[in-house]
Image (tube, rainbow, N blue to C red):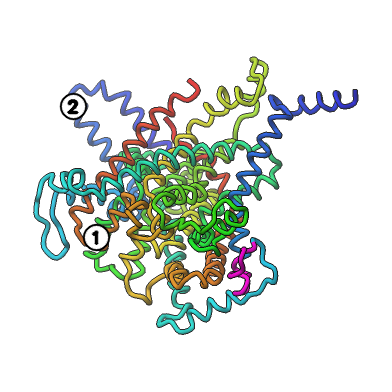
């Protein structure tokens, strides 16, 4: 390892000297290095074969298919931008899905991100034993699979539903509200459940980051005139956690655009007046029910651009934290 | 006088903290804790309620005479289904175990050269992995369906397992964690004549135990609840290959009187991942401390 690295460095230092063909020498050097480290590539191979087949290459495939009309039975036929045009002009249900998805992303995304950080920050002050119990309690919903279905029982539309019974008992309402059938409430309830589920990987990353913080920074800050916890948070904690903040943002943004299972299981599919319809449920509709793969791929491509775009923008913004 | 002394002492001990703000934040934390805990209490309570208590008006939050009837009913619901519950259980366990083991081993194998061997092209590969964290697996569902069907894997366990092995979060976390291993250790082994595989297996792997425990919980939680979502439902359509959470998700469709067995099923389903997390929590936190994205 060290020997080969030295080789590379020496070569880099030398490469200017070989005026005859630095490019050729460099290619040969890289090839030699590849050959020398072939065992490394052999270790990489099994994972990356699967990764490219199932994660990376499919993105390109989705973009390719989005320009075709493809129903699996017949070979795909090229249709240009027609799928995209239909999506944004003809498909009113897609526009509802787009609106709902953007609402989720704009409300649950930032809210869950702030909650992840703020709660991790609060927990950090507790003693280790209590801290790990509360971490478990907050993290549990996101690993408990179908447990969120219990919300369905709580919001049940008849008077046996807990929310209805509670409100009726105290006289707020006279008759049960159809929480999960009424488009007025559906979106808010899905958001609530989504928030309950959202203290996931990012939350753990923040806890870890806060625990690993260099305490001498805070002491130094106190000497430099930091008076209260909010100043400490803004001037010391947030900037030194920037890598975690960026990682956590990726996790929360990606999942806030992908709301689907909760919506489908809580309010059904299709939901009344499509009030719980999201881009992913629309995608599932065309992909696995109607088998219009070209059209579904166009939906996936739009989703991909939205996710990647907002991730990259937020990464840019987070680089400015505490500057 | 005594009070002020204590007060001063307290302030000295905790930098930049005021008692009144401590109190406010405590109530915020308590409120959040209540919001997170109530559904669980509610679920356990519902799971233990006898049928007549489920239909009490006004409903009671806590169970009065707890019973295990709902667990028995859960068994009863599945006693006359065409596919027995044990088969669903086997499917879930097989898919979750195979997928998790595959993911942990393959992702660690790939993480080691990326973290430690400075391969030509390694940074590009890792950048692609980081980019792939920025979109959800739903984006690739359609191409994956086609790929799986071309490979002839449709309607088999592998249709669920292979895509799960290829998830990128595990590789990312493992690579970040492996970067902490001192180069000197690996170089020493190399001088002793150990092969790259041997170094990976007998030096690196034992040192990254916290990271593989983390990959286990992340991969397992994904696979454990995989069958009822969009992908699970369309990649595997034979009833005898469906997973437990798919079977359980059908229970509530039977009506409100089934909310007892549903809560019982949810309780069973959450026990395993939660138990794994309890056992691995400190390792997970340790791994996540290296998870930051560098500028």
Please give the residue where the numbered disc 1 appears in the rendered image.
B147
The C terminus of chain B lies in quadrant: top left
> Is the residue B200 above or below the residue A115 in the image?
below
Chain to which mark 2 belongs: A
Are there few (<14), some (14-19), or many (20+) residues within 10 Å of tag 1? some
Q: Residue B113 location in percent, x, y? A: 40, 45
Q: Closest to the observer: A67 or A236?
A: A67
**Looking at the image, which is closer to me, B179 or B248?**
B248
- The subunit carrying tag 1 is B
Badge 1 vs badge 2, beta-carbon distance below 8 Å: no
Q: Nearer the viewer, mark 1 or mark 2?
A: 1
Q: Nearer the viewer, residue A264 or A254?
A: A264
Q: Is residue A229 above or below residue A117?
A: above
> Mostly what secondary structure, the magenta segment?
loop
Local secondary structure at mark 1 = helix
Q: Quadrant of the N terminus of chain B?
A: top right
The stretch in magenta equals B46-60
Please tell me whether residue A255 belongs to the stretch shown in magenta: no
Q: Residues within 10 Å of mark 2 (few under 14, many from 20)?
A: few
């Amino acid at each position: 390892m060290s020997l080969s690295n030295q080789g590379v460095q020496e070569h880099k230092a030398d490469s200017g000297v070989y005026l005859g063909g630095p490019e050729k020498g460099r290619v040969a050097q890289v090839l030699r290095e590849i050959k020398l480290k072939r065992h490394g590539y052999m270790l990489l191979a099994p994972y990356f074969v699967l990764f490219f087949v199932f994660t990376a290459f499919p993105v390109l495939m989705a973009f390719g298919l989005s320009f075709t009309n493809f129903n699996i039975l017949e070979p795909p036929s090229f249709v240009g931008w027609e799928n995209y045009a239909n999506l944004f002009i003809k498909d009113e249900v897609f526009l509802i899905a787009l609106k709902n998805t953007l609402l989720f992303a704009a409300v649950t995304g930032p809210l869950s991100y702030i909650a992840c950080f703020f709660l991790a920050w609060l927990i950090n002050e507790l003693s280790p034993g209590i801290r790990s119990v509360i971490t478990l309690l907050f993290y549990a919903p996101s690993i408990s699979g179908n447990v969120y279905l219990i919300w369905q029982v709580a919001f049940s539309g008849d008077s046996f539903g807990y929310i209805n019974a509670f409100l009726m008992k105290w006289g707020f309402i006279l008759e049960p509200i159809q929480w999960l059938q009424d488009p007025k409430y559906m979106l808010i309830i899905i958001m609530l459940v989504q928030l309950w589920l959202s203290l996931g990987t990012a939350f753990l990353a923040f806890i870890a980051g806060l625990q690993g913080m260099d305490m001498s920074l805070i002491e130094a800050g106190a000497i430099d005139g930091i008076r209260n916890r909010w100043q400490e948070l803004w001037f010391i904690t947030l900037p030194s956690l920037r890598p975690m903040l960026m990682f956590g943002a990726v996790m929360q943004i990606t999942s806030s655009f992908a709301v689907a299972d909760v919506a489908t299981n809580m309010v059904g599919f299709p939901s009344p007046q499509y009030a719980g319809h999201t881009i992913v449920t629309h995608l599932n509709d065309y992909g696995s029910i109607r088998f219009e793969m070209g059209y579904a791929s166009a939906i996936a491509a739009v989703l991909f651009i939205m996710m990647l775009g907002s991730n990259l923008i937020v990464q840019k913004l987070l680089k400015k934290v505490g500057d | 006088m005594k009070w002020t002394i204590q007060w001063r002492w307290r302030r000295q001990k905790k930098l930049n903290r005021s008692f009144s703000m401590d109190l406010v934040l405590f109530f915020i934390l308590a409120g959040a804790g209540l919001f997170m805990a109530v559904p669980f209490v509610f679920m356990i309570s519902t799971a233990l309620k006898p049928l007549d208590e489920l239909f009490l008006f006004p409903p009671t939050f806590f169970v009065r005479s707890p019973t295990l009837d709902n667990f028995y009913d859960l068994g009863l619901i599945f006693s006359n289904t065409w596919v027995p519950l044990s088969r669903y259980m086997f499917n879930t366990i097989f898919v979750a175990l195979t997928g998790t083991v595959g993911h942990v081993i393959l992702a660690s194998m790939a993480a080691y050269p990326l973290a430690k061997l400075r391969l030509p092209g390694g940074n590009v590969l890792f950048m692609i992995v980081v980019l792939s964290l920025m979109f959800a697996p739903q984006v690739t569902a359609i191409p994956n369906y086609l790929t799986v069907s071309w490979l002839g894997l449709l309607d088999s366990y592998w249709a669920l397992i292979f895509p799960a092995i290829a998830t990128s979060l595990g590789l990312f976390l493992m690579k970040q964690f492996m970067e902490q291993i001192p180069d000197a250790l690996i170089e020493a082994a190399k001088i002793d004549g150990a092969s790259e595989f041997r170094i990976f297996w007998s030096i690196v792997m034992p040192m990254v135990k916290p990271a593989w425990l983390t990959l286990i919980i992340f991969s397992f939680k994904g696979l454990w609840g995989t069958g009822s979502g969009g992908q699970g439902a369309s990649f595997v359509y034979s009833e005898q290959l469906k997973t437990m959470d798919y079977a359980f998700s059908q229970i509530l469709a039977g009506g409100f009187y089934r909310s007892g067995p549903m809560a019982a099923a949810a309780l069973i389903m959450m026990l395993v991942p939660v138990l794994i997390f309890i056992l691995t929590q400190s390792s997970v936190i340790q791994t996540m401390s290296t998870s930051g994205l560098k500028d």
